[in-house]
Image (cartoon, coloured by chain):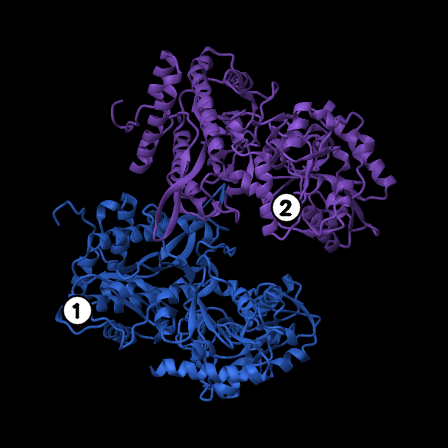
Chain colours: A blue, B purple
Amino acid sequence: MTKIQTIADRLQMLREELRREHLSAFIFPTSDPHQSEYTADCWKGREWISGFNGSAGTAVVTLKHAALWTDSRYFIAAEEQLQGTEYQLMKLKIDGTPTVAAWLGRELADIADKAVGIDGMVSSANSVKELITDLRKEGGITLRTNFDPLQRIWHDRPAIPDRLVEIHPMEYAGEAAHDKISRIRKALRHQHADGMLMAALDDIAWTLNLRGTDVHCNPVFVSYLLIATAEATLYIDKEKLTPEVVGYLQAEGVGVRPYDEVRQGLKDYFEYNILLDGDEVNYTLYQTVEREIVDVSSPVPLMKTVKNEREIAGFRSAMLKDGIAMVKFLKWLTPAVKAGGQTEVTIDEKLTALRAEQPLFRDISFDTIAGYEAHGAIVHYEATPESASALEPRGLLLLDSGAQYQDGTTDITRTIALGPLTEEQKRVYTLVLKGHIQMELCKFPAGATGTQLDILARQALWCEGLNYLHGTGHGVGSYLNVHEGPHQIRMEWKPAKLQAGMTVTDEPGVYLEGQFGVRIENTLLITPYKETDFGKFLQFESLTLCPIDKAPILTELLTQDERDWLNAYHQRVFDTLAPHLNQEETDWLHEACAPLTMNHEPK
Amino acid sequence: MTKIQTIADRLQMLREELRREHLSAFIFPTSDPHQSEYTADCWKGREWISGFNGSAGTAVVTLKHAALWTDSRYFIAAEEQLQGTEYQLMKLKIDGTPTVAAWLGRELADIADKAVGIDGMVSSANSVKELITDLRKEGGITLRTNFDPLQRIWHDRPAIPDRLVEIHPMEYAGEAAHDKISRIRKALRHQHADGMLMAALDDIAWTLNLRGTDVHCNPVFVSYLLIATAEATLYIDKEKLTPEVVGYLQAEGVGVRPYDEVRQGLKDYFEYNILLDGDEVNYTLYQTVEREIVDVSSPVPLMKTVKNEREIAGFRSAMLKDGIAMVKFLKWLTPAVKAGGQTEVTIDEKLTALRAEQPLFRDISFDTIAGYEAHGAIVHYEATPESASALEPRGLLLLDSGAQYQDGTTDITRTIALGPLTEEQKRVYTLVLKGHIQMELCKFPAGATGTQLDILARQALWCEGLNYLHGTGHGVGSYLNVHEGPHQIRMEWKPAKLQAGMTVTDEPGVYLEGQFGVRIENTLLITPYKETDFGKFLQFESLTLCPIDKAPILTELLTQDERDWLNAYHQRVFDTLAPHLNQEETDWLHEACAPLTMNHEPK
């Protein structure tokens, strides 16, 4: 009741401001001035106004109604969180769901002078430009971008974080900041650009070999980086910088100015033109620039996703530690559940504690998704002490988790049989596993995109009329964000080409609402496979080192190639992890990694 | 020598015209006023000026040099045909190959006032617009579009064809022309367009249920169709119309005006706006329009590719006849080759004769590709009496052929063992077959695109470092063009969604230059598979009915699913064709369709 009441109060305050400003509606995207996927608390305006805390969504409030758009990952969670508020849930990519502009067109149909607001600082230039066009088409609605009602009504709005920045050592970064800046300048010349404004926080952290703790789970720090032909300037609040970091930046050729002077910095920029990625830079800053804009994709994300040797070594080290923590956890789990008293929340605490024991552990890399049975069908479920299911020695637990170690970032999903399963659970689990393995086995020419590969993870499911609506895989940062682009493996077209040195997850799943969910995820590294008259071919190598639960597998459904892959993977997991485990853990792992037996054979 | 001499003469005449017109170069695309893939002879200007007769290519002639761009299907053929001329071959999609604009930029670098010509009537509006932009970027080259030098120098240029048009009966068309026009008008309203100019000859033939013989292998007729809110006008030369067709068109609500009055028709068009597909309508006509242009994809190709029940029945009937002809041919082939005296040309004549015996046979649907051994590695090889290899009782014959029957169009490739094979031939053949079968087995959600499916036909090849650079599949017309869009199965992104009722080929291959080529192709129909909580799923059904040669198969390389598919397919081929064959043919087919035996088992 309290929360629902709060949302109603907030909407009332908002509407008073809208009336004062002669606005018919306001749009709250999930974003911040840096187009971050995860944002600092001060930019969680959409969550504050709607109560929905998922990582993607757009709230729109008119004087009479309110609606929230989100994607299939959050349909169930959003429905729960919006219950009792006046928000109507708008399911993206479902037939009949209107766009924000179309909905506003209908809602405001009777109003003569239609103006809608959005904060131009927290939306990308491209998304605002598109919105302007769409709203104009929908009965001539105009969009105002220079007003943020939250400044007036969000009284306890958190401040912009001021946490200290630390240097990411060369041992893990593998390339000095000044060398990266040189490479970026070369890429800019290739685009006939004299400079660029970098707004993406992980791109800035990668470029400068710096890390921060401003954003939950993402080791980034709030700042902008303006690179020109001869100068580079980091716009950051000085409280965040130790003398050591100030000296380091100077030595790397990077000047420092206060965070809120970036607009002035753009006005003072004197070169002929500047590269601004309209998907990355916010609308307000984009509009500030008076020089010619080279609006193309930033070259930095692609440079960042191709890992160097030190970064790959760091991944291997991080994955070893993460595997050790996971094995200790899995060995503990089943007896603990049998003993009783465990919930989705308590096991998450246990897992995080085990990870925290590992060297160089810094944080988790995203909020753990521990979904038991029906909760497993909520794709991005986050258990709370109130919602958490008690775990019983039966059924499936979906566990998607990861850590930030200073040498690498991890992301792993296992679906674990806590005891007896239904035949349907076994069948669905085995089909998801087939998809997972087919992707692991994939060989492909350099230049292929993730869209081309995606079907391999789905074909076994599609044959049974099953599917999942999320992507199959995303890049993983090197002690950086767990979601990294521009490459992805997904059904939608993504033109970014897969290259050796990129990381990408392989995480097919199936979610049966009200019943259970299955997802099996490893983080993979793209490596050279062979070179022939037909060109260079690439393959995947699993970085993740953790047994895949064999209990739910209907072995007969796997092909020989699939069985061979699983057995070889388990052998490698055992050989790599066992030297770091005690005898009891080794014995458990030995059993977990033993070759598959056909179900009809005696064990 | 004669041909090479001719090309030199023609280039000299062209350059005289270029000098007279103050042009530094001229561009000859492979196209016609209708953006046809296959054009009437009068528009084969690129072939006339270069000597290269492939179905795709662009010739560019400057005052000093000449170059020809074509794609990987024609690299070998083009190299042969351009030998001895001054043309330099430019291999598309190969690293280091410049674009036409970039090449011209370099070639004309020293010239001050740079103007290049292209005939705006034989290039799409979009391609010319793109060329204008690209040439401007390359050192300010301007493009002139209103001059066709071929009018002056191609003295024996053929006339525009004037062959008679015939009515395509409702029995095969399944939907009356006036109903199709109603559907098109509805689609136009959906795009807020009042009318459209249709230039694609197969779209016009489909819309009006008319067929012609103006273009080799394609049953179309040269014309434009202008559809307005209340009127429809066919621009066609009157000699092509019998009184019956004139009466038919009148009854269907379609007026007739002469072909060369289409520009006037566009000038006289009086509605508010008009849909012109800039990829379909030529630049000159596009520029003629004075009304607002709605430049979006024409709705007609998509309507045409989804076959109705009568068209599907026609396909089945055509495929039965084509299968009978193919079986008679295959039964004849091996003994005939053993007896000696057969070449790539003589067997093509035999096959065409057998097809011509079938009811409703009208033509072949494309020039047969009969490539024995090394010739099989030339993707679009066309044997001539001079080039044709003599067939010997060993090695592989690649045979890609098809027919136009009044009830349907066929397109089939078989690769046939004429006798003993090398181990590599067997291995490559089996890998291609695996790819072919994996596509046949594919199940996919409605809304999937061919780009997503493509990898299934390639994965077995990629695992061995093999590949093919052409697409995996294209739509097939209903007694219309053998290549039909907009959907395709290929590595490049094609956004057109696969729908039930579409036809599409499945034709993976491997081409080892100087050695042999393998391609295995069926034409498939997309049909409903199942509907679940996850939506509608689709599958493929082979329309093609013809045994796939088992002799080259290394059975052990096939999975059980793949073996099962082949055995079931062969059973269906036998059951469907046998009732139409004599005893000897039935016996041959029985053996050809017998289940696979493992190679290590006794036969």
Question: Residue A351 falls in which quadrant of the image?
Answer: bottom left
Chain assignment, label 2: B
For the residues marked 1 and 2, what is the alpha-carbon distance in whole angstroms? 64 Å
Left or right, B383 with reference to B414: right
- Who's the residue at 36% across and 12% down the image? B583
The residue labelled by disc 2 is: B97
What amino acid type should be assigned to the residue bearing mark 2?
Thr
- Who's the residue at 41% across and 41% down the image? B464
Q: Give the farthest residue toward the right.
A: B20
Question: Residue A261 falls in which quadrant of the image?
Answer: bottom right
Chain assignment, label 1: A
Q: Nearer the viewer, residue B478 or A311?
A: B478
Q: Nearer the viewer, residue B497 or A442?
A: B497
The residue labelled by disc 1 is: A337
Q: Which circle, 1 or 2, is nearer the viewer? A: 1
Residue B230 percent location from the top left of the image = 67, 43
Residue A420 percent location from the top left of the image = 16, 58
- Circle 2 SS class: loop
Relative to B576, residue B289 above or below: below
Left or right, A140 with reference to A40: right
Whether residue A546 is visible, yes or no, is no
Residue B182 percent location from the top left of the image = 59, 42
Q: Nearer the viewer, residue B178 or A15?
A: B178
- Circle 1 SS class: helix
